[in-house]
Amino acid sequence: MVYSLFNYTESPDEYHKRVLEILEWGSVCYPMRYQPCMTLEKDSYISPKWTSEELEMVQKARRVIGYGGTFPPYEGLVKKFREAKDFEEAFSLYPLKRSKNKSKNTQFIQTKIN
């Protein structure tokens, strides 16, 4: 397992390249958000090269497409990071596709709520 610090001196695109490199080694990548020691509030520091949205993208991706807060070197995950043209594409989550056919119970509940 390799710990990878983000929100420090690198840009999001540089971080994307580092995560890809770790995954291509066959190692598990464990993202760790950088916070200065003198920060009074957890997760309040945002590096000049990062935005709060980009930081949230990493946090969500590690929970949704990762496993146990990490990025394991699964073939599909490595492919996603390799084929991504930039940070945004690599760490974006695609919306779930909803079926057009709703069950009767769901229709009943929605009717009662409306």
Image (spheres, grey):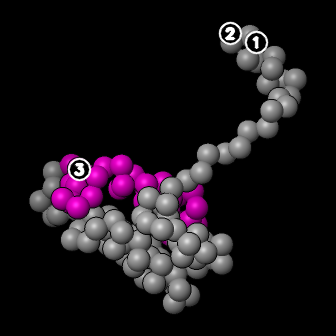
**What residue span does the magenta drawing correspond to?**
41-70
Q: Earlier in the sequence, mark 1 or mark 3?
A: 3
Residue 104 in the image: state x and y as whole percent: 87, 23
Instruction: Give the SS element for disc 3.
Output: loop
Q: Decide whether residue 55 is among the magenta residues.
A: yes
Callout 2, which amino acid? Asn
Q: Which residue is mark 3?
A: 44
Q: Is residue 24 left or right of residue 97?
A: left
Q: Residue at x 15, y 64 (%)?
A: 37
Q: Which residue is mark 1?
A: 111
Callout 1, which amino acid? Thr
* Towards the viewer: 30 or 74: 74
Above/below status of 3 relative to 31: below
Quarter holding the C terminus?
top right
Q: Which residue is mark 2?
A: 114
Q: Decide whether residue 72 is among the magenta residues.
A: no
